[in-house]
């Protein structure tokens, strides 16, 4: 989970700077800070809590047990604080890099970054389904007995719910940023 969520936070920020390219290329702090605030609102209310929920409730999901061998996240008291710090650093760094590239007219460099992150994520998840699509404790995972994600009704319900929220948030913020760029006088 962490292996994809932190890069995705970076990529989503780059994507939003692409959607706000007209504002950012127009220049001026109002456009920069408006785009930044929209990115922060999305990350805070539509994304950052999702990996935290899954880390705290389904610690063994995806490839967590490749590096962390306890059955529960409470065995690692610094895991959550470090994840939150790295998540937000990644999101802000993605915004910074994306906005710099957009302002400098290097739109394709920015797009390569967020599309590359999307490709990496898809490869990571679908190239190792025996790891990325299983839940369970480290003991179950190590023995090859970790259940598939769809075998847990709670997990499946929450996964579908958060994916709807996450995708709806991305679409809504992207369209909003795009439309504002078409009508700069709205700000």
Image (spheres, rainbow, N blue to C red):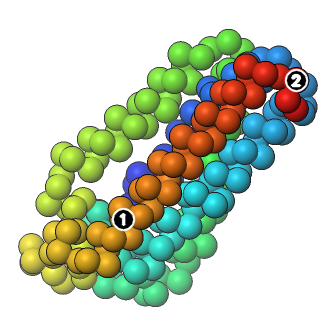
Crowdedness near tag 1: few (<14), some (14–19) or many (≥20) residues, C-alpha within 10 Å:
some
Q: Residue 150: image x %, image y %? A: 20, 68
Task: Check disc 2 and report its element: helix, strand or loop.
Answer: helix
Task: Check disc 1 and report its element: helix, strand or loop.
Answer: helix
9 to the left or right of 143: right
Q: Look at mark 1 in the image and give the residue it sits on.
A: 159
Crowdedness near tag 2: few (<14), some (14–19) or many (≥20) residues, C-alpha within 10 Å:
few
Of label 2 and label 1, which has the lower sequence position? 1
- Residue for point 74% across, 23% down: 181
Q: Look at mark 2 in the image and give the residue it sits on.
A: 185
Q: Residue 180: image x %, image y %? A: 75, 28
- Residue for point 29% across, 63% down: 62
Residue 133 quadrant? bottom left
Which quarter of the rendered picture does the N terminus lie within? bottom left
Q: Residue 24: image x %, image y %? A: 77, 24
Residue 13 in sight here? no
**Number of disc labels:** 2
Q: Nearer the viewer, residue 128 or 186?
A: 186
**164 above or below 107?**
below
On residue 49, the disc is: none
Q: Looking at the image, which residue sits at the far top?
A: 105
- Residue for point 60% across, 65% down: 84
**Which one is in front in this view, the residue at disc 2 or the one at disc 1?**
2
**98 above or below 106?**
below
Residue 156 quadrant? bottom left
Q: Nearer the viewer, residue 125 or 85?
A: 125
């Amino acid at each position: 989970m962490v292996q994809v969520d932190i890069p995705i936070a970076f990529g989503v920020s780059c994507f939003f700077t692409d959607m706000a390219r007209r504002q950012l290329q127009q220049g001026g702090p109002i456009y920069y800070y408006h785009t930044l605030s929209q990115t922060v609102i999305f990350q805070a209310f539509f994304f950052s809590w999702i990996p935290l929920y899954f880390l705290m409730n389904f610690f063994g999901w995806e490839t967590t047990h490749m590096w962390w061998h306890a059955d529960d996240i409470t065995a690692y008291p610094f895991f959550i604080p470090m994840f939150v710090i790295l998540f937000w650093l990644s999101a802000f760094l993605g915004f910074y890099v994306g906005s710099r590239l957009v302002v400098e007219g290097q739109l394709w460099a920015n797009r390569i970054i967020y599309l590359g992150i999307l490709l990496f994520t898809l490869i990571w998840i679908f190239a190792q389904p025996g790891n990325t699509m299983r839940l369970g404790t480290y003991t179950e995972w190590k023995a090859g007995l970790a259940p598939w994600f769809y075998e847990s009704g709670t997990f499946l319900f929450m996964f579908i719910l958060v994916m709807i929220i996450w995708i709806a948030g991305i679409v809504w913020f992207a369209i909003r940023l795009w439309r504002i760029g078409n009508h700069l006088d709205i700000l």
